[in-house]
Amino acid sequence: MIKGKVWLFGDNVDTDVILPGKYLVLTDPNELAKHALEGLMPDFSKRVAEGDIIVAGKNFGCGSSREHAPLALKYAGVGAVVAKSFSRIFFRNAINVGLPAVISGARDVLQEGEVISIDLEGGKITRGGSGSTIAIEGYPPFLLDILKDGGLLQNLKRRVSESGLK
Amino acid sequence: MAMTISEKILARASGKERAEAGEYVVGKIDLAMIHDLTGPLTLNVLKEVGYDKPWDPEKIAIIIDHQVPANTEVTAALHRQLRSYARKYGLKNYHDVGRQGVCHQILAESYVKPGMLVVGADSHTCSLGALGAFSTGIGSTEMAAVFLNGELWFRIPETINFVLKGSLKKGMSAKDIILSIIGRVGVDGALYCAAEFTGEGVERVSIDGRLTMCNMAIEMGGKTGIVNPDRKTEEYTGTKNAHLPRSDPGANYFKTVEVDLGEIEPVVALPHSVDNVKPVSEAGNIEADQVFIGACTNGRLEDLAAAAGILKGSKVHPGTRLIVIPASPKIYLEAEERGYIRTFIEAGGVVCNPNCGPCLGGHMGILTAGETCVSTSNRNFIGRMGSGSSKVYLVSPETAAATAIEGKLADPRKYVKEAGN
C-alpha cells in the first residue's frame, strides 16, 4: 500500500521540467533526485516527503525518453504518480524503475496536501479524511509483477539467473 | 483481415499471421540504438544484472551525438563507457568522434530498412517510421532487457490516418505541415497511437521531409510516425523489388484527419508548448538572440539547402547569432560541396560539427536568462535550451533563415522565388 500527501500538478508536465536536460550527464539517482521537478518548483526535492504522491492532469511525462525523469522523482521520495493519462514512454519507464504510474481522474477531486493511499491490486485510491474511494485503472498482471519486484532491473536479474546465462 | 502497416510489422516481428490494435505482443527487435545520454544508464543496468553480452552485436547501434566532442570530464567518462563496451564486444555499428552524427540521421542513412522493428533509447526514434519501419523510443532499463534477449513487449497501437492532400505553396516545408497538424490535434492528440501519413500529399514529400514529420509524432504523444514505403523509400534505402509492408485498403483506423497542404502557411510553435501554433504572420514582434538550424528535426540536406537559398548573399542581423549544424558527416560534406557551408559562414553564421547542438541545452548554444532562440528543433518546453526564463520558438528552416536575416521572427515567403517542395 502506498500512502502519502498529495501534490497537485496540471496537464502536460513534460520531462524537461521534471528533470532539465543539463542534468542528464548525472547517473547517480540520488544526485538526480536533487533536481526533481526543478523546472516547475525549484525546491520540490527539499519539500517532498517520503511516500508523497504527485497527482496530475493529462499527458504526464510528455517529451523525452529520459529515464532520469522517473528516477529523479522516485529517489526524491515520490511514492507514485497519479494522472489522467501518461505519455507512453514515461509510463513504461516509471514502471520499469519501480515508480507506480497510476491512471485515474483523481486530479478533479483531490485537494493539495491531503493524505491518500493507493491500493494497486485492489484498483482504488482511498482518501485519508473521508475514507471515500476513487477508481484507478488496473495493470495487466505482468506489469504488476514488475512493480512488485521493484522494477525491471530486479525482474531481469531473476530472468538471467533462471535462464542460466551466467 | 485488412491491417495497417504498423499492425503488419508488429505481427511479423512477433511471429503471428495477424495482429490487431489493443493486443499485447512480444516482438523480436531488428535494430536497437543507444546514445551518450541514455546509453550509460543501460550499461549500468547490465552491470547490475551481472551479464552484459548483447544478444546480437549486428543489431545494436551506439551513436555518440548529444555532447560530442566531449565538453566536460563527466561527459568524457560517459563516452568512454560506451566506447569500452563497443570494443569489448566488437560492435561494428559504433559511431564515435569522426563518424558521429545525430543518431536518427545515422540510423536512416546506414541501418534502417522498411518493415524493420526498431527501438532506440531516445524519444525521437519515431523519426525512422519515415522509411516504413515501426520505430519507437524506449527507456534505458528496457533497452537493457532488449540487449539481453532481443525482445520487447508492445501493445499494438491504434493508428490515426493523417491524409495529406494537395501541395505546399512556395516558402513552406514539411516542418510547417507537422507543426500545423500538432497545433490542430494537441500535444496528446495521438497519445499511444501510430501517426500514419498517407495520401497524394505525402507522396510528394521527400524522405528528408518525411523524417521531419515522423520525428515530431512524439510531440503529439505518438508511439511512432509512419509512412508507407514507395519508390522514394526504395531508392533511399536500396530495397528495390523487395516485398515491403503497406497498409491494406480497408485497414482499421482509429481516426482520420485530413490536411490540405495548399492551406498551410509558415507557422511557429510559441513557448512553452509544441501545440501553441500560430501563423508566423500573426505571431507579432519576436526578436531572436539566436537562430538554430539543425537537430534531428531539420539538420538534413534539404533543410540546409532551403536555409542557404534564403541566406545566400545576405548577412545575419547584428543582434542575432546563427548556429547551423548538419546532422551527419555525409550531409556536412554534401552541403560543403554544394556551397551551403560557405553561404552560412559568409552570412556570419557558425557551422558546428554534427551533433544535437543547442536543442536540449546540454552542450553548445545554451541560452541565458531571458534570451530567445528561433529554432528548427522540436521542443520548446520551459528551460529546454538553458535558463528557465529563456524562450524557444519552433519553425521551419526557411523561417529560421529569414529570421536570422531580420533579427526577428520573419515570414520566409518574400525570400523564396522557386516553387516549394
Image (cartoon, rainbow, N blue to C red):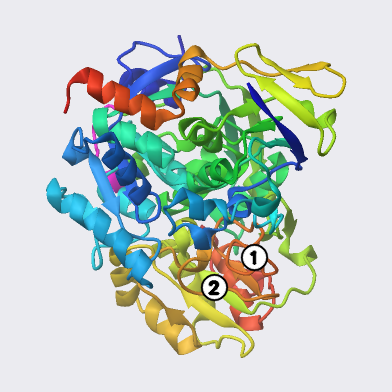
- Specify few, some or many for label 1: CA neighbours under 10 Å numbering under 14, 14-19, or 20 or more: many
> Which quarter of the image is occupied by the N terminus of chain B?
top left
- The residue type indicated by label 2 comes to Ile
Q: Look at the magenta stretch and give its main secondary structure.
A: loop
* Residue displayed at 66% across by 64% down: B393
- The residue type indicated by label 1 comes to Val
In the image, which residues are magenta? Answer: B234-243
Task: Look at the numbered disc 2 and give the secondary structure of its residue.
Answer: loop
Q: Which picture quadrant has residue B89? A: top left
The chain to which mark 1 is attached is B
Q: Earlier in the sequence, mark 2 or mark 1?
A: 2
The chain to which mark 2 is attached is B
| Residue B332 located left or right of residue B359 | left
Check residue B241 for magenta coloring.
Answer: yes
* Residue displayed at 45% across by 89% down: B346
Which residue is labeled 2 in the image?
A: B366
